[in-house]
Image (tube, rainbow, N blue to C red):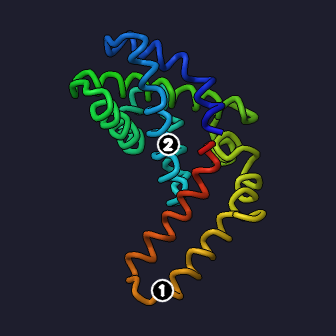
Amino acid sequence: MLDKIMEAVGGDALSQITSQAGVTPEQAKEMLPMAQESLQEGLTSQLTSGNTEGLLGMFNSAGSDGLAGNGIFGTIKGLFMQKIMGKMGLPESVAGLAAGAGMGSMISGVSNMLKSDGDNEDISTDNIMNVLGGGGAAGMLGNLLGGAGGALGGLKDAASGLAGGATEGAGGIADSLKDAAADKLGSLFGK
């Protein structure tokens, strides 16, 4: 699903990165997969923790000065900036400008998609689930719960495997359950 969103908002993000960070169009194109990874990591983290209200706040502040001060946006932007510096070797100042411009543009684009998904100009939790979950809250729950390989099946398998392995501590169990949930939610974003 995130691949489709990136197709819709990627062009504007490219132009924002190029114009505001002073990088070449080729460099900006190289950054887009990193932006998608960062967005996926940030959104998955919020969805797995059940923070749809926090996402609602971020998407509702898109296009305003409030977005820059939003904690979730700051985290996602930071992930993107670190990837730019690590993979492209660009200085922090350039990476910061590129991450801010690109991610701000992408969040605004997703926000507009969320607004157009609803009956009015307000973004709701249902809009978030429709656009990010592909088919509404029921569709997202269906993806998480249903069929062979559903998230609950994967969590059950992980828990069963851990129950049999007495050598793992509570931290290992929590990490394994978290990894299983992240894998299942990652499939929602086309990974």
Marks 1 and 2 close (CB-CB < 8 Å): no
Q: Please, what is the three-letter code of the amino acid marked with disc 2?
A: Gly
* Of callouts 1 and 2, the N-terminal one: 2
Q: Please, what is the three-letter code of the amino acid marked with disc 1?
A: Gly
Q: Can residue 42 be seen at all in this image of the molecule? A: yes
Disc 1 crowd, CA 10 A, few/some/many (<14, 14-19, 20+):
few
Q: CA distance from mark 1 to mark 2?
A: 42 Å
Residue found at x 47% / y 17%: 14
Left or right: where 93 falls relative to 73:
left
Q: In the picture shown, does residue 59 fall above or below 45? A: above
Q: Which mark is residue 175?
A: none
Left or right: where 92 falls relative to 125:
left
Residue at label 2?
Answer: 57
Residue at label 1?
Answer: 165
Q: Residue 63 in the image: state x and y as whole percent.
A: 48, 25
Q: Residue 181 in the image: state x and y as whole percent.
A: 56, 63
Quadrant of residue 116 in the image?
A: top right
Quadrant of residue 26 in the image?
A: top left
Secondary structure category for the residue under label 1 = loop
